Amino acid sequence: MKDSIRHLIQQALTRLTADGVLPEGLSPAIQVENTKDKTHGDFASNIAMMLAKPAGTKPRDLAEKLIAALPTDASISKVEIAGPGFLNFYQNTQALAARLDALLADATLGVRKNGPAQRVVVDLSAPNLAKEMHVGHLRSTIIGDGVARVLEFLGDKVIRQNHVGDWGTQFGMLLAYGMDLPRGFRDKELADLEGFYRAAKQRFDQEPEFAERARQMVVELQAGKEACLSIWREFNETSLRHCQALYDRLGVKLSMKDVKGESAYNDDLANVVADLKTKGLLTESDGAQCVFMDEFKNAEGNPLPLIVQKAGGGYLYATTDLAATRYRANVLKADRVLYFVDQRQALHFQMVFAAARLAGFVPAAMQMEHMGFGTMNGADGRPFKTRDGGTVKLVDLLDEAEERAYALVKGKNPELDETELRQIARAVGIGAVKYADLSKHRTSDYRFNFELMLSFEGNTAPYLLYAYTRVASIFRKLGKGFAEVEGQLNLQAAQEIDLAGKLAQFGEVLAGVGDKGEPHLLCAYLYDLAGLFSSFYENCPILASEDETLRNSRLRLAALTGRTLKQGLELLGLETLERM
């Protein structure tokens, strides 16, 4: 509805500009907000107050001219001026009811992308295969997955890319250690990736001869020596199986076919440097090959280098990322590329994107966006660690979440059998971890707290999962599905209208998530929707209503709420439950 009102206002502004009421060249950001007091309209805009000064008139006078210039729209019953010049828009409840009836009959709840579909590459997760996945990989994985799901639902062609760290100097150390182990014992050692890495690192730090051999292994690996490549492949396959087990457990839509690691670009790195040189973009600095760009300077005003080749001839992350940009442009034919990587890498990606455009590696129309995120911290506000200060393994975090959820659910439903208890505990525990992250603004740091995230009160996964089961229980009593309710919507009570208005916003919210890469917008929407359904449920009898027409109308409103909650939770990657 907000988008529709913005469009109406834009049409009015265009008309007033053409009539000379407004000066040429104005392009205001049109704000439309929900009103708290429904007696003064459902939505309000301060556009008249924003433009009164440029127009050389009073806000209320301009507001009158705007109302006169607004096109007619069946979804708006009237527009009034309030206060110093606000425009208050009232919904047409009959038109709203008809719209929701149409949404209920639609397989995608009426959700359509505003513009043309795009090919969108989503760069997400990207663990380092030298170690097991830890909590630091959680945000990239689940935020990227949530946004990818929403974009697919909107109609985009989404191509997931898991840019794993499977190349570089640390692999020489691991290869050297692995070669000293018999094959059967090596397989056993690799079952504990962390232990394997620690043992290799210890020898690297303590044995100079081993360290030298490890460095030589890097050279041989990069040269394509089969003895090194064989163990390297073995190590990567084991690591990726560890990752895939966690992706499956998290319900993340990533598979082995989505892996496109750093090693995949190795053959193109020399070409990247050569092409930059041909374009005249390289400058040698202390023996290294660098790209300097005017817009990037340090605090002293000196230019910052984007180093693409070290003095010794080695390549860096920037080189690999540049190779990836042109693969995504030329092979994947991306219209848009989203990088879900730690916010601390913002400058790196700004420089890579700028260099890629300067070098002509990507077409001008291709969008490249760094979707940075903050850190997950412990209760003390510092990066999340184990009690002894070590890195928290993701598998251990999920184990604890499920066990805590099991105890919680069993305490509330001791009569449930063990199989169902475990199923519910898995959905609640994993969902709680994911939702606690997704419900926070992407760029913000947040504090991990099991007690808060597993609460049945507030903006949490258990609260929303339970809200859905309340809707499902209504139809379970009837022995019907959401699609089996006859009749039409007829909105009368204030609680019905409020709930209906929120349901109509689903498509706009998803568009916002897709545009901004911010799943918390969907979380906030679902939390508000659940609260409005609760108010509707308490104040508007559904099954107890003796009027069949009214009963069917309210059942249809409940059905649309259930479908919207279920679809929204699934787009966030949460498993819904029919009871809990």
Image (cartoon, rainbow, N blue to C red):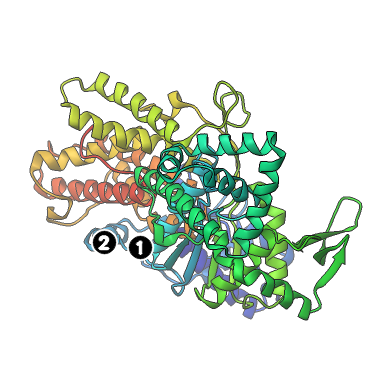
Residue 64: give x, y in percent of width and height.
57, 64
Closer to the observer: label 1 or label 2?
A: 1
Quarter of the image where one finds residue 150: bottom left
Element type at mark 2: helix
Query: On the rendered image, what quadrant is the N terminus found in?
Result: bottom left
Residue on which the image places disc 2: 98
Q: Nearer the viewer, residue 562 or 43?
A: 562
Query: On the rendered image, what quadrant is the C terminus found in?
Result: top left
Q: Is residue 389 left or right of residue 159?
A: right
Q: Are marks 1 and 2 in contact (CB under 8 Å)?
A: no
> Identity of the amino acid at label 1?
Val
Residue 364 visible? The answer is yes
| Label disc, if present, on residue 305 of the rendered structure | none
> Identity of the amino acid at label 2?
Ala
- What residue do we see at 21% from left, 23% from top? 413
Quarter of the image where one finds residue 28: bottom right
Q: CA distance from mark 1 to mark 2?
A: 16 Å
Residue 58 visible? The answer is no
Mark 2 Cα shell of 10 Å, populated few (<14), some (14-19), many (≥20):
some
Sequence-first disc among 1 and 2:
2
Mark 1 Cα shell of 10 Å, populated few (<14), some (14-19), many (≥20):
many
Q: Nearer the viewer, residue 231 or 105?
A: 231
Residue 500: give x, y in percent of width and height.
32, 50
Residue 506 to residue 204: above or below: below
Q: Is residue 456 left or right of residue 514?
A: left
- What residue do we see at 54% from left, 25% from top? 386
Residue on which the image places disc 1: 111
- What residue do we see at 48% from left, 57% from top? 230
